[in-house]
Image (cartoon, rainbow, N blue to C red):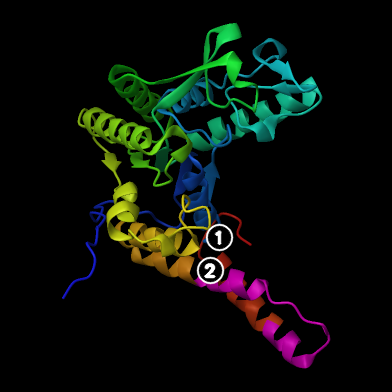
Amino acid sequence: MKFRTEVEIKESEKKIEIEDKIFSIGSCFASEMSDLFYDGQLQTVNNPFGTVFNPFSINNSIKTLHDSEFYHEEDLITFNDEFISLDHHTSFDTRFVHQTLEKINSKIEEGNRFLQNTNWVIITYGTSFIYEFLPKNKLVANCHKIPQKFFEKRLLTHQELTDSIYNTILNLKDICKDDVQILFTVSPVRHTKDGMIENQLSKSKLITAIHEAILLFENCHYLPIYEILMDDLRDYRFYKEDMIHPNAQAVNYIFEKFGSAYFSNETQEFIKENFKINKALEHRTNDDKDPKYLEFKEKLNEKIEAQRKKVKHKIF
């Protein structure tokens, strides 16, 4: 007897190998997945613009990375004595223009360099809603807690969504490796502040636009992450206390599903061992001269060294 409707991720013919590079961009869920790649000691870069939610802004981010187009002072605004880019997350805001520009442009340089050798791109869209900054007639990625009166909120049209996804794919195929695999997901995090009906409409538009756009390309795939949480893990015990964001158990379940479908056997074993090592590295002692602790540390270093011999890139 079954008590849940399990959602499977279709097994990929091409697998993620331990030396592959993975670039991810999009919502906060993309960051959580990227953190697991990082803990597994895979080569990954995530969100060079900070958390970005809508396809229009993500497309602008990818184009900027593709062109390696740096920001200048005239691209910023000031609010609450800070220099701000409306294309970036609030984590880039500083009190000094040169610091904001340095943070932004160093990430653009890093992202451009990484993308040129990237094997896998994971894009996670969060919403179809976008805000226009009225003083500049500019569609923005983040409102930076600027008063609502300066913005107008609307849904991106279907044409805007499909055009954004289409152009994103074109830029990625141009800058990345020839056989780059582009994986699209829709974040399972519900934007409840938009309203429950509005959130469902927003997510539906994203799913429709993705499926329509990727039909035109090879090596572009849709991952049913949204469906796994909505239909497979449809229980609030898989959410954090806010009842909106998936908890660690849900994220790990999705990561395991993804890994089973996309990781090679070698990569799965490599990540599994690195997770164990990371857990062991968290161990603390009150007596660092204790023979048992010294023995534990020696064995752990041996395991790390064995893992290092498996890859060319730096780990741990």
The answer to whether residue 302 is left or right of residue 229 is right
Which image quadrant is residue 49 in?
top right
Taking the image as drawn, is residue 220 in sight?
yes
Marks 2/1: CA–CA distance: 6 Å
SS state under label 2:
helix
Q: Which region is colored magenta?
A: 273-296
Q: Where in the figure is residue 235, as x and y percent of width and height?
A: 36, 61
Task: Say which amino acid is labelled 2.
Answer: Phe
Is 290 a magenta residue?
Answer: yes
Dot 2, how many residues are within 10 Å of its Cα: few (below 14), some (14-19), or many (20+)?
Answer: some
Marks 2 and 1 close (CB-CB < 8 Å)? yes
Which image quadrant is residue 210 in?
top left
Residue with the mark numbered 1: 39
Dot 1, how many residues are within 10 Å of its Cα: few (below 14), some (14-19), or many (20+)?
Answer: some
Residue at the bottom extreme of this rendering: 291
Q: Earlier in the sequence, mark 2 or mark 1?
A: 1
Task: Note whether 209 is above or below 263 in the view shown.
Answer: above
Q: Where in the figure is residue 25, as x and y percent of width and height?
A: 48, 38
Is 161 a magenta residue?
Answer: no
The residue under the point 24% across, 62% down is 6
Task: Say which amino acid is labelled 1.
Answer: Asp
Dominant secondary structure, magenta: helix
Which label was assigned to residue 113? none
The answer to whether residue 159 is left or right of residue 59 is left
Q: Nearer the viewer, residue 267 or 54?
A: 54
Image quadrant holding the N terminus, namely: bottom left
Residue with the mark numbered 2: 275
Q: Nearer the viewer, residue 294 or 55?
A: 55
